Image (cartoon, helix red, strand yellow):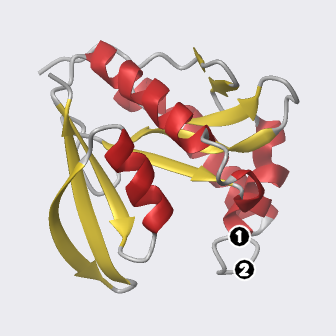
Amino acid sequence: MSYRPMPLHLETARLRLRPWAESDVDVHRLLAAERGVGMPSIEDNRRVIEAQLAAPAMTGIGLLAIDRRDVGDFIGYCGLTVGRASLDEPEIACELFRRVHGYGYATEAVSAVLDAAIVTGRKRLWATVRSWNAPSFRVLEKVGFERDHVSSDDRGELVWLTRSLL
């Protein structure tokens, strides 16, 4: 099936979601370091950003950098990716700096990406969340995702959620 490309510029009341820029390398490194696995090298992180910049041309979907509109600062990313899912039923992903948790930014960004996913003509999305990540479950449940099944990988239990776009 053929899908329309996902819009790569989204705005909400408080957020601007946009394509990545090479200037995002340093702030993205800080975000990645919050995962607790160390600071990625500049070169490794530059490759991550380059892959994110190239993804929409290859797949029609992508992860978008998030800036707060009032301050203009990078606070994370949200978007669609093949990830553990498929191009027909992609995975929604969102990661924000801890300092901005609890303000509703994740729910706002995920809602905007859901609207963008509907525009592509897809029928269903997936999300995968580590079983310990209660805040992500709350965000996804607020926007209509439901638990589907649980799997495990080398990092532990992974909960799969899904949402119909019809």
**Circle 2: residue type:** Gly
Within 10 Å of disc 2 (Cα), the crowding (few <14, some 14-19, many 20+) is few
Which quadrant, please, contains the N terminus? top left
Which quadrant, please, contains the C terminus? top left
Q: Is residue 105 found left or right of 34 in the rendered image?
A: left
Relative height, residue 11 to residue 26 (above, below): above
* Residue for badge 1: 34
* Residue for badge 2: 38
- Residue under the image location 54 percent in, 32 percent down: 108
Q: Is residue 75 shown to the viewer in this render?
A: yes
Q: Is residue 151 found left or right of 45 in the rendered image?
A: left
Residue 116, image x, y percentages: 40, 20
CB atoms at circles 1 and 2 under 8 Å apart? no
Towards the viewer: 142 or 9: 142
- The nearer-to-camera label among 1 and 2 is 1
Within 10 Å of disc 1 (Cα), the crowding (few <14, some 14-19, many 20+) is some
- Residue under the image location 84 percent in, 24 percent down: 70
Relative height, residue 151 to residue 125 (above, below): below
Residue 25, image x, y percentages: 78, 49
> Dot 1: what SS?
loop
Q: Is residue 165 found left or right of 109 in the rendered image?
A: left
Residue 10, image x, y percentages: 57, 18
